[in-house]
Image (cartoon, rainbow, N blue to C red):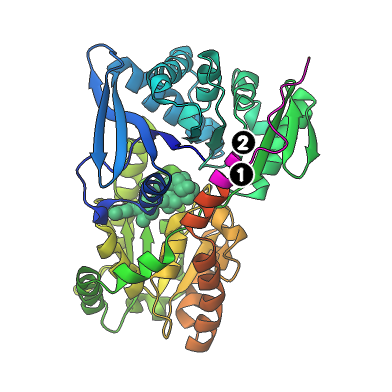
């Protein structure tokens, strides 16, 4: 097999950062690049007065990283525009938040073209190219225009929306057609793959040829569900690190005679934070006797702050947490601790382990890695309980969690009551099944399955005569 070229909007880790601040996904992709050798290409995160296409090449911990600067208009129209104001809300079932501005679509096409032109000289004949996420759907089309014949794979980290939602997107057909310039397209779950297939059947008259192939637009595309996982062994290892232990002790000291409920999410409307706060408030109202026995810690580092919907949700959460604390706090206790900053991975591990309940209630989520990290960080002899939204991709696999509809404050309240009352025996029983899943379906196996499927394009990519 040739080299592996990974393309994503941003190249994580942010240059110069230590491993403790990298996400599990970044670690896994970096490890793949060390193994297969290759290049990780993406936007530097910086803007320049004019686009030059100048590549900055660096070697960080055995991985070659190639980045390019964009123009301010690129950032506004492509990243903050089409990617995060149009596709993200729509794919997370929020058409009410989706903005359809022609300049966004133009910026999106332009940046994909620029990415392709800048990346083209780096691609050698035997390389496999693996493109990540909704920012870069048209990249394969642009690379093909430049004569690239290599196997091109695409993985969508977020949901694929239901057919009726997809057709609300202006020029949806062009976007879907662009996916057919890849050889392999991967989704997080069978459900998202089915939604994609439904679109192709209804809208293009496409057909599923077999388990793994869809024919449409005169092309045959290999497809599959590739549920992403985490490095469970690494999570267990960092849970025993000195910083994780110190964080655990701090949390334990703050919750003496109390049980900790924890949520960890980017500050994003798709994560269901408002609904979660309302569910917790409902729990306090419904269970006066249990009130002083709990502390709800929500860690929510801000993200995409240039986008208005993200500024608005921040304001609403500030007032909601204030309202709950105002109504229920005592001189020595606040029910909600809401923090808007990010923590190191080893600190998060300590927090997860100290929490009796992991509260993961997105309204929509491609997978949700926090749910898996929470499971991996638990003490096998005294594990906590995962409360999980049915609308997270992870709910397909983590069936022993307490599954809830995140839109229902009553269901959240009831699940919290059950989780807090659950005896050790049942907690252990459920956790073992969850942990087996998290331990066996890791981020490395996800990566190897995807790269394996891309390397093995049999029957080979066929461009049918129209
Ligand atoms: C997208 C899809 C899919 C969070 N706060 C801190 C921190 N995090 C880390 C978590 C976790 C990661 O960020 C978040 O991953 P999620 O999967 O929960 O969500 P998205 O960011 O929306 O990711 C999602 C994922 O892609 C992978 O395919 O699962 O559905 O939306 O690893 O731990 N990490 C650190 N400090 C924090 O404060 N260090």
Count neighbours of disc 2 (C-alpha within 10 A) and say few if under 14, some if 14 to 19, many if 20 or more: many
Q: Image height check: is 89 above or below 117?
A: below
Tell me which residue sits at (48%, 82%) in the image. 421
User: For the stretch drawn in magenta, what is the main secondary structure?
Assistant: loop
Q: Where is residue 55 in the image (x, y as percent from the top left)?
A: 28, 23
Q: Position of residue 222 (x, y in %)?
A: 67, 37
Please name the residue that numbered disc 2 is placed on: 184
Please name the residue that numbered disc 1 is placed on: 453
Count neighbours of disc 1 (C-alpha within 10 A) and say few if under 14, some if 14 to 19, many if 20 or more: some
Give the number of the disc on residue 121. Answer: none
Q: Which of 248 and 118 is in front in this view?
A: 118
Query: Image quadrant for the C terminus?
Result: top right
Q: For disc 1, does the CB lie below 8 Å from ligand 1?
A: no
Was residue 205 drawn as part of the magenta stretch in this picture? no
Q: What stretch is highlighted in magenta?
A: 451-465
Was residue 460 drawn as part of the magenta stretch in this picture? yes
Please say if the residues under marks 1 and 2 sit with CB atoms less than 8 Å apart. Answer: yes
């Amino acid at each position: 097999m040739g080299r592996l070229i990974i393309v994503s909007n941003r190249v994580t880790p942010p240059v110069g950062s230590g491993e403790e601040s990298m996400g599990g996904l970044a670690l896994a992709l970096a490890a793949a690049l060390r193994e297969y050798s290759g290049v990780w290409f993406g936007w530097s995160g910086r803007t320049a007065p004019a686009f030059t296409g100048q590549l900055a090449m660096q070697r960080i911990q055995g991985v070659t990283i190639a980045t390019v600067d964009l123009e301010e208009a690129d950032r506004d129209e492509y990243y903050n525009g089409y990617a995060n104001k149009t596709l993200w809300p729509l794919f997370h079932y929020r058409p009410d938040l989706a903005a359809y501005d022609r300049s966004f679509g133009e910026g999106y096409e332009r940046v994909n073209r620029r990415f392709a032109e800048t990346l083209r000289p780096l691609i050698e004949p035997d390389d496999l190219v693996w493109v990540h996420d909704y920012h870069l759907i048209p990249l394969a089309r642009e690379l093909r225009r430049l004569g690239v014949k290599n196997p091109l794979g695409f993985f969508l980290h977020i949901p694929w929306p239901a057919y009726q939602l997809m057709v609300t997107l202006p020029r949806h057909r062009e976007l879907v057609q662009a996916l057919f310039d890849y050889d392999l397209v991967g989704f997080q779950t069978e459900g998202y793959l089915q939604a994609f297939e439904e679109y192709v059947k209804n809208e293009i008259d496409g057909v599923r040829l077999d388990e793994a192939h869809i024919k449409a637009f005169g092309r045959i595309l290999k497809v599959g569900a590739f549920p992403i996982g985490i490095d469970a062994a690494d999570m267990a290892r960092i849970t025993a690190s000195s910083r994780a232990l110190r964080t655990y002790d701090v949390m334990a000291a703050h919750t003496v005679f109390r049980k900790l409920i924890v949520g960890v999410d980017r500050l994003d409307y798709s994560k269901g934070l408002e609904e979660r706060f309302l569910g917790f408030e409902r729990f306090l109202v419904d269970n006066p006797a249990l009130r002083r026995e709990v502390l709800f810690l929500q860690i929510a580092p801000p993200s995409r702050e240039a986008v208005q919907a993200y500024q608005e949700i921040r304001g609403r959460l500030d007032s909601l947490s204030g309202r709950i604390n105002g109504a229920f706090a005592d001189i020595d206790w606040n029910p909600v601790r809401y923090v808007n900053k990010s923590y190191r991975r080893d600190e998060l591990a300590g927090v997860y382990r100290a929490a009796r309940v992991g509260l993961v209630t997105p309204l929509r989520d491609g997978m949700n890695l926090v749910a898996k990290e929470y499971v991996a960080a638990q003490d096998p002899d005294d594990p906590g309980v995962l409360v999980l939204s049915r609308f997270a991709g992870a709910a397909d696999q983590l069936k022993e969690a307490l599954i809830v509809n995140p839109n229902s404050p009553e269901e959240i309240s009831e699940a919290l009551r059950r989780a807090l009352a659950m005896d050790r025996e049942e907690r252990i029983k459920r956790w073992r099944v969850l942990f087996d899943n998290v331990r066996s379906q890791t981020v490395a196996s996800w990566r190897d399955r995807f790269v394996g499927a891309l390397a093995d394009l049999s029957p080979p990519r066929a461009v049918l005569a129209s």
